[in-house]
Image (cartoon, helix red, strand yellow):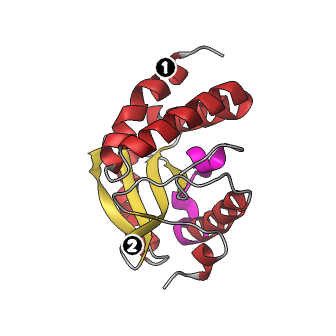
């Protein structure tokens, strides 16, 4: 059963599938609700919490999954987040999936992902990349819409293979990260 945190925001995609949704202004509200829960659970462990990923970029289609970056003082502090994050419904997926990234998922009945939290070193390369990409997409609607077009193409090609979909976006993301402001 979906919790109150998911019901009113239309969140969720099957764990291996790719399905894009129309932009939804309530995604920001869903983030704010989750940010408060995370800050309450983690206390001083969380140096900062930020909404990133496609749901944080206005006016583009996205998988309706809220991506959240939690910055901690040292990468190793991510391990201390496991128990507090579990207390608010997050399952620890590990730190071996993506380098320098402790990943936590929040699901509906273990099948439909609604939130993905990345616990990384605050100010480190991963943290900077998350926020740089988000901020460039927000400042440049032309880039955001090019990214959306790529996502639409890839979603139709990799509808049942989220890993391939994610991998196919990497070149675009890297190009944006390498641009100077």
| Local secondary structure at mark 1 | helix
Nearest-to-viewer mark from 1 and 2: 1
In the image, farthest residue toward the left: 96
Task: Assign the C terminus to one quadrant of the image.
Answer: top right
Percent coordinates x, y for residue 124 in the rendering: 47, 35
Which picture quadrant has residue 84?
bottom left
**Residue 52 is at least partly visible in this image:** no
Magenta part of the chain: 40-57
Residue nearest the viewer, comparing 28 with 160: 160
Residue at 61% from the left image edge and 77% from the top image edge: 7
Residue nearest the viewer, comparing 145 with 46: 145
Residue 129 on the magenta span: no
Q: Residues within 10 Å of mark 1 (few under 14, many from 20)?
A: few
Residue bearing mark 1 = 175
Residue at 52% from the left image edge and 42% from the top image edge: 122
Along the polypeptide, which appears first: circle 1 or circle 2?
2
In the image, is 36 to the left or to the right of 20?
A: right
Percent coordinates x, y for residue 94 in the rendering: 29, 57
């Amino acid at each position: 059963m979906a919790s109150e945190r998911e019901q009113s925001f239309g969140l969720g995609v099957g764990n291996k599938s790719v399905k894009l949704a129309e932009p939804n202004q309530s995604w920001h509200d869903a983030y704010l609700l989750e940010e408060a829960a995370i800050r309450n659970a983690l206390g001083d462990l969380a140096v900062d919490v930020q909404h990133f990923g496609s749901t944080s970029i206005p006016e583009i289609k996205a998988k309706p999954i809220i991506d959240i970056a939690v910055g901690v003082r040292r990468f190793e502090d991510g391990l201390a987040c496991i128990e507090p994050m579990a207390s608010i419904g997050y399952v620890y997926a590990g730190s071996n999936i993506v380098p320098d990234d402790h990943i936590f998922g929040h699901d509906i009945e273990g099948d439909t992902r609604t939130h993905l939290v990345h616990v990384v070193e605050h100010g480190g390369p991963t943290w900077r990349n998350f926020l740089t990409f988000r901020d460039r997409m927000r400042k440049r609607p032309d880039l955001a819409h090019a990214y959306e077009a790529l996502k639409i193409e890839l979603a139709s090609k990799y509808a049942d293979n989220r890993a391939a979909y994610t991998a196919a976006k990497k070149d675009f993301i890297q190009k944006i990260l390498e641009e100077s402001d």
